[in-house]
Structure formats: C-alpha cells, structure tokens
Image: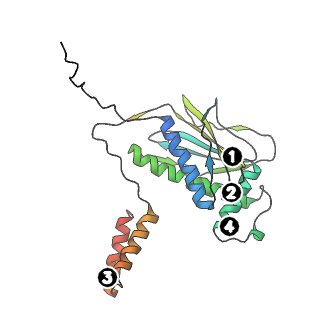
Amino acid sequence: MTSLNQPESSVESPIIVGPDDILLELCDSVSCVLSRACHKPVRQAQMVQNIQHTSLKPDISGFVVFEGGFTGLVILNFSADAAMDVYRDYMMSMGMDEAGLAMRYTSDEVSDSVGELMNQVVGDFINRINLRLQSSVEQSQPKVLTSGRQLTISIDAGLQTPITKRVAFYTQNNNTFYLEYAMEDTEFVATKAYIEEAAHDPDSVLANHQAQQATAGGNTAGGGGDDSDALLSELGL
C-alpha cells in the first residue's frame, strides 16, 4: 500500500513549440519593430482569429514567403490611413521634413517604406525563431501591392495542410492593419539537452562597449585595433 505522504514522481513535460507559439513571436516582431522604427506605439489586438485562407486586400498589402526548417507565409494588409500613419512616422523618425512627404498612399515612397519595414519585421522574426528552434529559416524579398479597388488576391505558398490566422494591429491614430499568417501544421519538440540560445541585441552591445571605453578613460593609438576586434567579436561578426 502506497503511503499518502509519499511524493509522486515528477516528470517534466517536454517543451513543444507549435504554430501558435511561432505566431506570437511574429506578432511581437511586428509591434516591436514598427514601434521602434516609427518612434510611435503600435498596438496588437489581444485576440487571434482563425481564418480559412490568407489573401492580399486593399489598400496596401505586402507579403513574404519563408522556408527552411518550416514553410510559411506572412501578409500585412494596410488600410490607406494606417499605411500613411506608418509611412509618415517612419520618415519623420529619420529626420524627414513633413512638408516633403508624399500625400497619397498610392505614391511609390509609401509602398517602398512598407516593403522596407516588412523586411525588418520578418528579419527580426526569423532571427528570433532560428534561435528558439535552433533551425534555419530564410525569407524571400517582400513584395508590395497597392490597389484602390476592392481586389482580393490569394497567395499559394505550396502548403498542404496550412494553419491560417489573422491578428489586428493599431497605429497611434487607431487606424487598423492586419497580419495574416499561414504555416504548415508542424511542431518542434525539445530534447532533454535543449538550451535556448540568447539573442544578440546590437544596440545593447554597442552601448556596453561605449560605457566600457568611457570607464577606461582614453585609449592609446595602439589599442584601437584590439578594441575594434573585441566589438566585432561581441556582435558575432
């Protein structure tokens, strides 16, 4: 007879990363990268919507296909107002004069900015997910479509049994844009030896390096090369 005071054997559950976990990483990349690039907060809705398929919708849409350890598709669908919010904030955060900015969402400058920001978002996401999953995922170049008509275009990413989701985001002016996401139905299960790699934050590395230099006082001319080598090593270059 087993004693009531005998502790039960504890078996740790394995770490499992599935499509929903990967989506949360992507959502975090969208809000963090756009907030940092635009110097304005970009908020994420606290609900995730299941959808039947992903598609490009007016007024401005961008998409990126990623493949490698797993295959998926990322789409950002902007209303005209949301696209202009992101474009203006991004340009002005880099010192552009508001008087010199494009006035219409159909301008090439707006679609170019959306494509550039989308590239930063997906790049940040892939860096996060490669570290977490210890995998190798690569992205295609972002493609951006501007349409003033009620036009919906479906993208075939070659997924056999895709998981498809939609998440809403809001600019500081409460204009809405949507992330649509599709990936193959797969899971990553960690082994007992799994240790998640730490992400490198270049801004933190540079700040720490500058603080160390200031603490040390001036450097001699002969020590400049060693300092540069040490900084590059910290950055993983």
Is the residue 100 above or below the residue 40 in the image? below
Q: Helix or strand or loop: what does disc 4 sit on?
A: helix
Could you say which quadrant of the image residue 218 lies in? bottom left
- Give the spatial CA distance, label 2 vs label 1: 10 Å
Q: How is the image coloured?
A: rainbow
Say what amino acid the circle numbered 3 marks. Answer: Gly
Say what amino acid the circle numbered 4 marks. Answer: Met
The tag earlier along the polypeptide, 2 or 4, is 2
**Quadrant for the C terminus in the image:** bottom left
Taking the spot 62% from the left edge, 49% from the top edge, the residue there is 43
Q: Within 10 Å of the Cα at label 2, are there few (<14), some (14-19), or many (20+) other Cα atoms?
A: many
**Looking at the rendered structure, which numbered label has been put on residue 187?**
none
Is the residue 221 above or below the residue 26 in the image? below
Q: Which residue is mark 1?
A: 177
Badge 2 vs badge 1, beta-carbon distance below 8 Å: yes
Q: Which residue is mark 2?
A: 86
Q: Within 10 Å of the Cα at label 1, are there few (<14), some (14-19), or many (20+) other Cα atoms?
A: many
The tag earlier along the polypeptide, 2 or 1, is 2
Taking the spot 43% from the left edge, 64% from the top edge, the residue there is 204
Q: Helix or strand or loop: what does disc 2 sit on?
A: helix
**Front position among marks 4 and 3:** 4
Say what amino acid the circle numbered 2 marks. Answer: Val
The tag earlier along the polypeptide, 3 or 2, is 2
Q: Which residue is mark 3?
A: 223
Q: Which residue is mark 4?
A: 92
Answer left or right for 136 relative to 27.
left
The tag earlier along the polypeptide, 4 or 1, is 4
| Residue 212 screen position, x and y as percent | 36, 74
